[in-house]
Structures are given as C-alpha cells and as structure tokens.
Image (cartoon, helix red, strand yellow):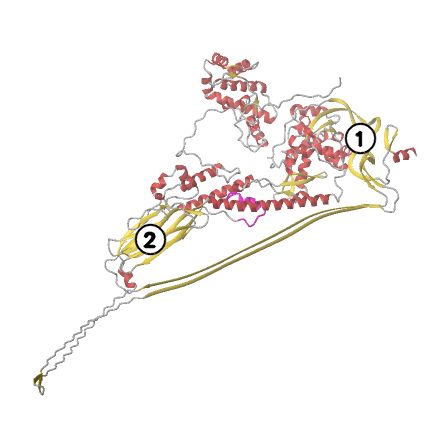
C-alpha cells in the first residue's frame, strides 16, 4: 500500500498562570531602569556586605531548605508544609512570615540572585543553593495563605529590563502578579469624600494621563451640577435721590421719591456655604490650577479647567500619535521602518557608558582541528533558465509602450460673504401738559322800553288806543379761563446704521503629474519567418577550492539575525528615506475628536483651516429701561434675548434699579420659567429650562416712575454643537490624511522609478567585508558578554572642542581592543547562513523577500541566524582560555612587547587581512558553483538555449563549442 499522507496532531502551548511563576523583585534598582543601568546598580550591590555568597547569615535558611527538600520531588499538601515549618521553628507559617526578618531575607535573596544574573557571574556565591532557598521562602509564604490546599516550588524569573518600564516575567506571559507575591500593605486613607469617578467621555479614545484628566473632569462635572442658589446674592439697597445729583441737572429733587437698587459685586461667585459643600478633591484641583472659588467666578473657573484639560489631552495625543512609516532601501527593495523594528532594529536611546568590561561569555572552544577554508572566485557569467519569450509573426510589427500617468488635480474654491445691515431709530417723547385757562366775561345788556297804548272804539267810527310797555333784558356770560401750561419736551433721536461686509475668497489649484513611459518594439514587417526574443536569467559561475591552514583551536557559535545592524544603518542614514514617510493612519471616528487631539492630527496632516471647538459656555446680556411719567403709572413690555446657536440657557443673574414714590408698587420680571418680584430682596440666580435660540423677557410695573434692568444669561454648549464641530473637523482631517497618503504613494513610485535607472546594490567585495565585520562583532559579544557600551576614548578638547584622544581611557581600552583583534584569525572566519524563519516571526514577511544583485549579500539580508567558525591564532590558546576563566586579557599582564611570543608584527596582520598567500595547502579538486542572480539578458539569437556535459559540468552549447575548440 502506497503512503498517502503524513500528519502530526499539534495543539498550542498554554500560557502559564501567574501563580506558577515566582518573579524576583530587586530593591537596588528602580522600575523603568534599562539593562546597562541595572548592571551598574548590580555591580554596586555586589560590592556591599548585603550580597549573599552563602546562606549562613539567614535565620530562616534551615527551615527554607527543609521545605524545598520536601517539595522538590512533587507538590505537597499545605498541612505537610506547615508541619515542617512548625518542627523547625516551633511557629506557624503565619508567625514566621510576620517576622520582619523573613521579608528582609527574601529581599536579600532576590537582590543577590538578580545581581548575579545581570552580571553573568556568580561572584563566588553558591547560586544553586541560594536559588533553592528563595524557592523555599516562597513556599513558606504560600503555606501561610488559608486558601492554599497544595504548595509547590515555583520556578524563579527575573524582571525584564529591556523595556522602559519594569515588566516582570509574569506580566510578560499575559498574567497579573500572583497575590502571594504581594506583601500586605495598609491601604491609604482617603483624603476627601469618596465618589464614583466620572465616566469616560465618548470623544476621547487615546490613552491619556488619568492622574491629570480625571480630577479635572470630576471638577467640571461638579461645577456643572451646581444649583442656582450657590451664587452670591446681589446687594439690595433702598435710598432717595441725592440733592447734588438733582442740582447738577438743574432741577430740584422730587419730594417723596425713593430709589431701590440691586447690584452684583462679584458676578457668578460662589457663596461660602457652596464652597464648603464642594468635595475636597474638587477644591484641591481648583487650587492646583490657580482658581480660588472665593474670588473666581464660575465662567473663569470653567475656562481655567478647560484650558488645563486641553493641554493634557494635547500632550496625550502627541504621546499616542503613531509615527509615520518611513521607507528605506535595503538591497533592491524599499522597506518600512517598522519592519526593521521586528527584525531587531530599534530606535532606543544611547545606552549609558559603562566601565571597561570585565565579563566573559559562556562559550567554550569546540576543539582543535584542521582549519579548512573554502575559497571561491568568480569564473564567468552565463545564461540560465528562460525568463520570458516575446514572439512576432512575419509581416508584423510589435510595439509595446507602457505609459503610467498619475495626475492629481485638486481645486478648492472657498468663498464666504457675510453682509450685515442693522438700522435702529429710537425716539422718546415725554410731555407733561397742564393747561388751565380762566376767562371771566361779564356782559350786561339792559334794554328799557316804555310806552302807553289805549284803544277805545265807539261804534264803527270812533277808536282810541293807549299803550304802556316796560321791558328789561339782562345777559350775563361769565367765563373764567385760566391757563397754565408747563411743557417739557425731550426728544432723543438716535439713528445708527451698521453695515458689515466680510468677503473671503480662497482658491487653491494644485496640479501634479507623474509620468513613466517605456517603449520597445520588434519590427518583422520585412521578414518571412517568425521572430522570437528569448530572455534568460543570468547565473554567476564561481570556482571553489578547499585550503588547509593547519591545526587550530576553533570556536563554533550561532549568532542571531546577522543583518540587523546593517538594516538599522540603512534606515537611519539613507538619504532616500528622508522623503519617503508614509503618514500614520487616521484611526479616530468623528466622536473621538476632542479639543486636545484635533490640532495634533491637523499638524500631522498639514490641515490649516480647522475651526476651534465651541467654548464650553457663553454669556448673553440684555438691558431694559423705561420712564413712566403719566398717570396711571403702569407699564409693561416684552423683549427677546438671543441665544447663540449651539447653546442652551442654564442660569440667569441680573441687577436692577427703580424709583417709586410710595410703598404700594409692583415690578415683575418674567424670563422663561422665572417670575421674579423685584420689590423683594433678589435671589442669587435663577435656573433656566434649557431654552435655545431665544429667551423671551417680559416686565410689568405699577406705580414705578423709572426702572432699569440688566440681565446676564449663562449658557452652556449643547451636545449637538459639539457633535457638529466633530463631524466637520473629522471630515477635514480625513481629507488631509488622504491627500498626504496620495503624496506619499506618488513619492514612492518616483523613487522606485529612479532606482530602476541606476545600478542597484553594492560591490560584492565590499559586501563581503561588511558581512564579515558584522559576524565578527556578534562573535565578540558572545565572547565578552558585553555590547560595546563602555568604549570610546575620544573627547573634545577643553579649549576649542576639537576631538582628541582621552589619555586615560586610551591607556585602559586600547589593550583590550588589541587583544581581541590579535588573539583570533578573523580573516579566516567561516560562516553559513540559516533561513529567515529562525529570526523573529513578525519580520518574516519582509525578511523573506529581501534581495540584492549580489546573491551572497541577499542570503545575508534574509538570514534568521548564521553559524560562524573562527580560529584562535596559534600561540594565543592559553591567553584565550585564561580570559574565559578569569575575564583577564593578556594572561593578566600588560600587552606583549617584541620579545614576547604573543607579539604579532603589524606586517603579518596586514598580510593576513589582505589575503596574502601563506602556508595553506589546497585539498581536493576545485568545483564550480552556479549562483542565480536577479539579472536578465536577451539572447542574441532566437533559438532556445541548450546545455552539454563537459566533464563533470554542464555548460551552454555555445560555451561547450568554445571548450572543444
């Protein structure tokens, strides 16, 4: 039966729980210390008498050793451990742990073990015995816990010093520290009223300094919830008009007229009771920012806190702002800088200089054997496998033209015109008329008329008449007209015409073009046979030969990621990388924009037309005045107090004054839900009903001669206004990000186009020197257990600042340099690269694609590790072993002179470094190695390539013919 498939069943490893690890926490180093500084602190601690070399000074060593012996085979029940503790001490584990000496000895053990680990040296101490004791102490502490049913010996781990913050091993595994690792401590007493912290604002997504923002947010929340009665009431006074004021106006003061006045001395200032009612932490926050509630009004306090909040948010946004992805060339590719971080390249700050290292590595010679070196030389280049075939039929013409045009045209026309015309015509006429007219006219018209008429008639012919008449007529018209006219006519006419015209035009036209054009063709119009263009990969043919250099003491080591330093150098010093910076991704939603981060992102994307956020409050004012001089003394009116769009009314506070001639009078103010009798002592302030757009204000007066009202309306910003600003700002920032991204993509395309026009890569000979130097450096790090932090013997002169050797440092460091340069035959260093997957996994996707025109250098760039064999120079074997045993160079003495067998003439160093022939002998026959390259050539003919065997090698047909010839 044939085999069909093989498989292996795997399951992912489980993360250890925090209770399974004991993290040693040294007290001689502060959290956040980097590794070089921690080593200095460890060296200082090791020089004190607190450094443990034996367990003799420990009072609980015996019981800890017994507990460790009990638990060494397997975990045991807690009762069994408690019995051992009681048998050796006569106390319970709780009593032993409560002893202050127990915790002190735990710290002493942790300090000693971590110091030995940092210095890579036991310093003559019994490290295994002290480790067992530390685990025993930890088991005793665990048995003192009442919830433990089983106790085990936990493995020890030291803190990680590579990060800026001290991260212990348990946290690195994704678990919180065990409760048994924490020593009981008294919780701090609260300094003020305990209240729930304010909820996180939905517009803040970035990590921000909670120790700064939480107190500010809490203070703003408390101030926003203040009742209207928290403000100081106005001053209320009753008096009469002064005589001096009346005389100044040329009149006499009216009799019986009183003035009532309400005045706010400190607007929006809190009362003493309201200040005392504030939580202690809020008062402390206000004091920390220079806002005294006793003298500072609510608007000013809000301004101060919002300014501090904006500064904190801005600082947090700057700290959380991701850096732009910078591209840099490695070989023939452009790599992002963050990929280099995954491949071991960091941008950490310079490490603190240390003294000359006295450490030595834990590597040992692999043995003594023949030093066999494989040397190679380029023999020729020849065509390899087919890369591409281009066919053209008879009577045809093939033209291939590639045109890549990227055109960006952005036109922004912004025109804003504001025309405001306001005309006011106010005329006031006060006329008091009293007209009294008295007219007295007496007209007496008397008319007296006297006569006698008698009429007698006797018969028809005799008539006698007699007439007597008396008439009297008296007409009396009495009219009393008295006129007194007092007229006061005051005309105040004010005509104000305001014309405001704001015209803003902004026109931005940007046209960017980038064009690549490639053209090539094949003309077969006159041909009768098909024509083919055959492209081949170019292979490098090298000849290799083994040489024997004799017996040598050899070191055989494996170094990680040999190209990491080279990639870092390309990242930091490439001129091309300075312009190729990919803008950071814009991760915020509209509701995550706040007053602190919008300017940070705007500066990142070069957005210049951002509007500031709406202020947290606005103060709107209104004044009303009237004079009533005609009976009956009644007056009323209505006026509107405009509220700015995006704000709502919260508090109303006012001052007023009026004049009246009696006690029977009324003066009322109605604003929103407020109905205030102004004849009574005024209230401090009134709460509004969240009115928007406009607040109607009405008044009513009776028996009031004149009055004047001044109103201040405290308005707070609405969520709708904040969200509108966020949406508008988010749109502009998004557009700015897209513009920067397009500019970056165009710059990358231009850089790649320009890179294709020049010869990529470096000279293979120079590349090999670079590779050998990097491998040599890593081998020295493994030999000496140091990272070259302590070297540098050049210092600026005290007068001109010119760099010159530091004599003391030179005398100390140069023998060290000379020893390691002469003790090994670095020119005979041999190496072999291992694949990329032995490097860190996040860098795989970039490392595996690295290439260069030099195939060997491509292998160097992609290598995840490298095996290196380097020999000891003959005669230096004992000196190297002495260093590995003691850390002393030159066998503990000075550098050799010319009479010493260890003296190496400089001529010999030069000859060996330049590859001068020596006593090496060739072994075996040379062989050919074909190395594929990334180069392509066009064959001179249309036929397909063929290979023939020539000896043990296969060569192309044309070369085979030449060989036969």
Q: Where is residue 917 in the image (x, y as percent from the top left)?
A: 82, 31
Q: Is residue 633 left or right of residue 210?
A: left
Q: Where's the N terminus, which quadrant?
A: top right
Residue drawn 57% across and 13% down? 73
Furthest residue in direction right, as rendered: 965
Comparing 148 with 631, the one in front is 631
- Category of crowding for the residue at label 1, using alpha-carbon neighbours closer than 10 angstroms: few (below 14), some (14–19), many (at least 20): few
- 121 sits left or right of 821 in the view: left
Residue 603 covered by magenta stretch = yes
The secondary structure type at the circle numbered 1 is strand
Residue hosting label 1? 375
Front in this rendered view, residue 790 or 307 = 307
- Is 74 placed above or below 423 here? above
Q: What type of secondary structure mainly makes up the magenta span?
A: loop
Q: Give the range drawn in magenta.
A: 593-610
Question: Of the numbered discs in the image, which one, if any, rests on residue 344?
Answer: none
Nearer the observer, 191 or 175: 175
Which residue lies at the image location 44% right of the left edge and 50% below the top edge? 644
Q: In this view, does 415 lie above or below 759?
A: below
On the image, the x and y values in percent for residue 499 come to 47, 61
| Residue 362 in sight from this viewpoint | yes
Q: In which quarter of the image is residue 91?
A: top left
Viewer-nearest of labels 1 and 2?
2
The magenta stretch spans residue 14: no
User: Which numbered disc, 1 or 2, marks the residue that appears first in the sequence?
Assistant: 1
* Residue lying at 27% horizontally and 66% vertically, measured from the top left: 433
Q: In which quarter of the image is the C terminus?
A: top right
Q: Mark 2 points at which residue?
A: 699
């Amino acid at each position: 039966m044939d085999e069909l498939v093989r498989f292996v069943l795997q399951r992912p490893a489980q993360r250890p729980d925090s209770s399974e690890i004991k993290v040693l926490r040294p007290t001689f180093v502060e959290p956040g210390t980097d590794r070089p500084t921690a080593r200095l602190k460890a060296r200082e601690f090791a020089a004190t008498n607190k450094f443990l070399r034996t367990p003799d000074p420990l009072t609980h060593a015996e019981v800890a050793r017994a507990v460790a012996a009990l638990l060494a085979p397997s975990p045991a029940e807690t009762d069994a451990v408690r019995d051992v503790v009681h048998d050796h001490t006569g106390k319970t584990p709780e009593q032993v742990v409560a002893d202050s000496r127990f915790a002190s000895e735990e710290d002493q053990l942790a300090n000693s073990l971590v110091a030995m680990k940092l210095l890579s040296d036991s310093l003559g101490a019994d490290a295994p015995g002290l480790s067992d004791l530390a685990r025993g102490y930890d088991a005793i502490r665990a048995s003192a816990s009442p919830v433990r049913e089983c106790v085990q010996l936990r493995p020890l781990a030291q803190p990680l010093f590579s990060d800026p913050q001290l991260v212990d091993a348990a946290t690195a595994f994704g678990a919180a520290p065990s409760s048994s690792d924490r020593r009981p401590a008294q919780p701090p007493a609260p300094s003020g009223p305990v209240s729930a912290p304010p909820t996180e604002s939905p517009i803040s997504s970035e990590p921000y300094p909670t120790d700064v923002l939480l107190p500010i947010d809490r203070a703003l929340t408390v101030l926003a919830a203040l009742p209207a009665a928290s403000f100081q009431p106005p001053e209320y006074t009753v008096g009469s008009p002064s005589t001096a004021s009346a005389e100044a106006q040329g009149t006499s003061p009216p009799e019986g007229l009183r003035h009532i006045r309400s005045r706010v001395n400190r607007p929006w200032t809190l009362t003493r009771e309201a200040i005392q009612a504030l939580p202690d932490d809020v008062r402390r926050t206000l004091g920390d920012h220079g806002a005294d509630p006793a003298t500072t009004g609510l608007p000013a306090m809000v301004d101060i806190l919002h300014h501090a909040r904006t500064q904190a948010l801005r600082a947090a946004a700057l700290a959380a702002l991701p850096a732009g992805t910078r591209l840099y060339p490695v070989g023939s590719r452009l790599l992002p800088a963050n990929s280099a971080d995954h491949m071991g390249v960091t941008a950490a700050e310079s490490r603190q200089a240390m003294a000359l290292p006295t450490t030595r590595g834990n590597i040992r010679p692999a043995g003594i054997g023949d030093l066999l070196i494989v040397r190679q030389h380029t023999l020729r280049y020849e065509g390899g496998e087919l890369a591409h075939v281009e066919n053209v039929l008879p009577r045809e013409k093939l033209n291939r033209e590639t045109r890549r045009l990227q055109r960006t045209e952005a036109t922004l026309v912004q025109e804003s015109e504001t025309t405001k015309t306001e005309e006011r015509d106010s005329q006031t006429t006060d006329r008091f008329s009293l007209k009294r007219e008295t007219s007295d006219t007496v007209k007496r018209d008397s008319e007296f008329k006297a006569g006698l008429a008698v009429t007698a008639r006797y018969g028809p012919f005799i008539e006698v008449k007699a007439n007597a008449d008396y008439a009297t007529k008296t007409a009396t018209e009495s009219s009393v007209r008295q006129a007194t006219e007092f007229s006061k006519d005051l005309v105040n006419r004010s005509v104000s015409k305001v014309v405001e015209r704001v015209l803003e035009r902004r026109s931005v036209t940007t046209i960017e073009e980038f064009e690549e054009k490639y053209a090539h063709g094949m003309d077969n119009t006159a041909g009768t046979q098909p024509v083919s263009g055959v492209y081949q990969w170019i292979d490098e043919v090298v000849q290799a030969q083994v040489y024997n250099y004799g017996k040598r003491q050899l070191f055989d080591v494996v170094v990680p990621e040999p190209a990491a330093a080279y990639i870092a150098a390309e990242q930091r010093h490439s001129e091309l990388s300075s312009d190729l910076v990919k803008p950071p991704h814009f991760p915020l939603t509209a509701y995550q924009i706040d007053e602190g981060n919008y300017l940070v992102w705007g500066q990142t994307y070069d957005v210049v037309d951002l509007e500031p956020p709406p202020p947290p409050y606005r103060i709107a004012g209104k004044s009303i005045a009237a004079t009533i001089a005609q009976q009956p003394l009644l007056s009323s009116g209505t006026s509107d107090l405009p509220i700015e769009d995006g704000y709502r009314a919260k508090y109303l506070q006012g001052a007023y004054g009026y004049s009246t001639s009696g006690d029977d009078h009324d003066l009322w103010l109605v604003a929103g839900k407020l109905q205030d009798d102004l004849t009574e002592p005024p209230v401090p302030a009134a709460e509004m009903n969240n009115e928007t757009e406009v607040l109607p204000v009405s008044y009513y007066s009776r028996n009031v001669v004149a009055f004047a009202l001044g109103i201040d309306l405290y308005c707070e910003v609405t969520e709708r206004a904040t969200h509108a600003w966020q949406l508008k700002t988010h749109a502009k920032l998004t557009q700015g990000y897209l513009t920067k991204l397009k500019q970056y993509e165009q710059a990358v395309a231009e850089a790649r186009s320009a890179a294709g026009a020049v010869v990529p890569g470096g000279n293979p000979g120079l590349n090999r020197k670079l590779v050998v130097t990097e491998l040599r450096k890593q081998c020295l790090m493994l030999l000496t257990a140091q990272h070259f932090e302590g070297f540098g013997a050049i210092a600026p002169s005290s007068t001109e600042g010119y760099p010159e050797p530091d004599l003391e440092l030179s005398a100390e460091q140069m023998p060290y340099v000379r020893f390691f340069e002469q003790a090994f035959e670095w020119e005979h260093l041999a190496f072999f690269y291992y694949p990329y997957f032995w490097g860190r996994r996040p860098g795989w996707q970039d490392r595996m694609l690295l290439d260069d025109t030099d195939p060997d250098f491509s292998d160097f760039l992609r290598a995840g590790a490298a095996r290196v064999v380097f020999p000891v120079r003959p005669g230096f074997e004992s000196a190297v072993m002495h260093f590995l045993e003691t850390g002393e160079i030159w066998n503990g003495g000075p550098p050799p002179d010319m009479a010493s067998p260890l003296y190496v003439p400089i001529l010999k160093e030069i000859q060996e470094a330049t590859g001068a022939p020596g006593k090496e002998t060739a072994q075996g026959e040379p062989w050919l190695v074909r190395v594929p390259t990334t180069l392509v050539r066009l064959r001179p003919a249309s036929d397909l390539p063929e290979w023939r065997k020539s000896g043990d090698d296969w060569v192309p047909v044309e070369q085979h013919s030449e060989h036969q010839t």
